[in-house]
Amino acid sequence: MGAWAKGCALPQTLDQAVEPSWIALWTDESGDTMKRWIGGRDLFSLPPYLVDDAALLWAESLQPKRREEWIAEWGPKCDSSCAGWAELEARLPIGERWTPYLLQPILGRMDRVQAAQSVLDHALLSEVDDELVPFFQEWADRITESDPASLRGGWAGWLIGRMEEEESRGVERSEVEALMERLSLWGIQGDLWWKLANLSPHADLQNQILVRGAVAERDWSAASTALEDWEEGGVADTHQLTFHSLSSKVSARFGRVDDALFHLEWMATHGGGEDGLYRKGGFFFALGRTTEAEETYTRYLSRYPKGRRADLVRYHLFRMGMADDESESALAWLLETADPDLAPHRLYWAYRLLGDEASRDELLSQFPTSFHALFVREYDFERFDLWKAIFPDEGEGNLDLEEGMEWVELILPKIALAESKWRLRTGGESVAWRVAHSRLLFRLFEGIKASSVAFSLLTDPERLEMDRESQLGILRLVWPRFWDEELEDATQASGVEPNLLRALIKRESAWQPNARSGAGALGLVQMMPSTGKGVAEGLGEDWGELTTDLQDPAKSLRWGSTYLQGLLDRYEGDIPAALYAYNAGPSRADRWLESFPRDDYQIDADPLRLLTIPIAESRIYVRAIHAHWWVYSWEESVE
């Protein structure tokens, strides 16, 4: 095998490629074996999709001058390895002055987010010459609120760092205001707000920045103190709307109902009507003051019939009407909506309230895996063929990739993932490549991204050209099953139905064992460390480093299953109540049951009942897990 490292052929079969001895050579941590092998070969004798990756691996072993020559030659020709070439360029010794001449051709072959990350890495690694500031500033201006949080945060930090460097010349108020708005738009959290506040040349602006930062961090006490200081020092006319908006949030948080309503009404009558009225209606609704909520929402629609939240307002009016047994007027509000996300709701309720079978058939054919369609299948229309709804036709296609790619996927998953990303970006969006991309993401513990890619396959027309085996492969990628043995052990011990736990995991972490939420929940079942500690102690198990324990699949499954069963016991098998408690806490579930008793409904998962869950996130959560549960249970019968 050592001779192979000096230049013999690639593995010829998949069985050979995955033998431990081959894998050991290819996955050597230092990469030396692969580099030596590449060094003894003509790069173009490799499979085409490996050439630039192999060149990059070899270039990493070269001396700086020779490495620079390779970057200049191979960088402009990169495809899946562009990020690696850009990173290699960033590690070159910096001379008297860095210029982007080597980087620019590489950036042109990367997608915007990837390129923006690469430019940021360069900005943070080198001292920025004044002449190059416009280059970096241009890339900062391309960042949007939908970009990854790490990218937004990195560029925000760089912009503030530049402002700190320029503080000696005096920072203009307008510059600070512009950066403040950018941090707000990007959803920045953390100490960057405090750094920006320290750069403000005016006390009122400093206080506003402190309030915004505290609200972003949910530090309500700090926000309240900064608001008082801001008001005492005087609020500029141009910032009155922002002041009242932030004041309404802080007042509501501290239960100062009249103050919150005053600030929201001020917004509604002073240029912030759409936001003010929407939030005021929602605040009344949360307080249980439904008549005033309805009046406020109706006022919103009279002023903003095509506002960005108009369909949400109509949906809330529908919910309130249904709660008041005014189904006819309630349905009228829902049927006025045009939001595509509400289409399953419109079709289901038109069928249920009007007996419109055409709406039912459209629901089942167009949205077969939605909660409402699956509820119909589960309780009202058993003749519904879910397979035919998802795959109404089939062909002779398959999910095979080109020759040799299978072993690259198994042995060098990161290189294969980069290749699949590049292919999808450049138009190679075949079902086979998207399946490979999703599969690789799952393998590399990026389940959230993997699930997004997999779910898109359910609406791809090419899925109908695949044979049944390939279609089944797509289905089981959208609703995957991992750690089956550990999951079965956990559910047998706790009593939880296995597919219900699978559905919860799909919603909570998308099967990503290292998942961590903004609130600090961890692992497959997204459990808070304090909860995990309590469950472990209840089971008589030792617990050490909870962060590590909760990201261990076996422990996460065991503890999550035990906790879920405890909630099911508490609510006497009421699955929606148990899921609501899992998501929002038992106290909220208790209050919900007091207001809307379980006995009022024949079916626990009745869509009419779930409409009454007051928290939107929890309503969506409970519906989603039921939908996943029904699909997982049905999937077992599919051959």
Image: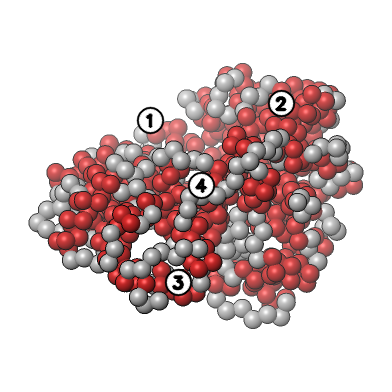
Number of the front mark, 4 or 2: 4
What's the mark number on residue 604?
Answer: none
Q: Callout 3, which amino acid?
A: Trp
Query: Do the CB atoms of the residues marked 1 and 4 lie less than 8 Å apart?
Result: no
Which is more N-terminal, label 1 or label 3?
A: 3
Frontmost of labels 2 and 1 is 2
Q: Which residue is mark 3?
A: 22
Q: CA distance from mark 3 to mark 1?
A: 70 Å
Horizontal and vertical percent position of residue 1? 40, 76
Please, is residue 79 above or below residue 524 in the view? above
Label 3 Cα neighbours within 10 Å, binned few <14 / some 14-19 / many ≥20: some
Q: Counting residues from the N terminus, which is met first, the one under dot 4 or under dot 2?
A: 2
* Cα–Cα gap, marks 1 and 4: 55 Å
Q: Amino acid type of disc 1? A: Asp
Quadrant housing residue 540: bottom right
* Distance between mark 4 and mark 2 Cα atoms: 39 Å
Q: Which residue is labeled 4 in the image?
A: 433
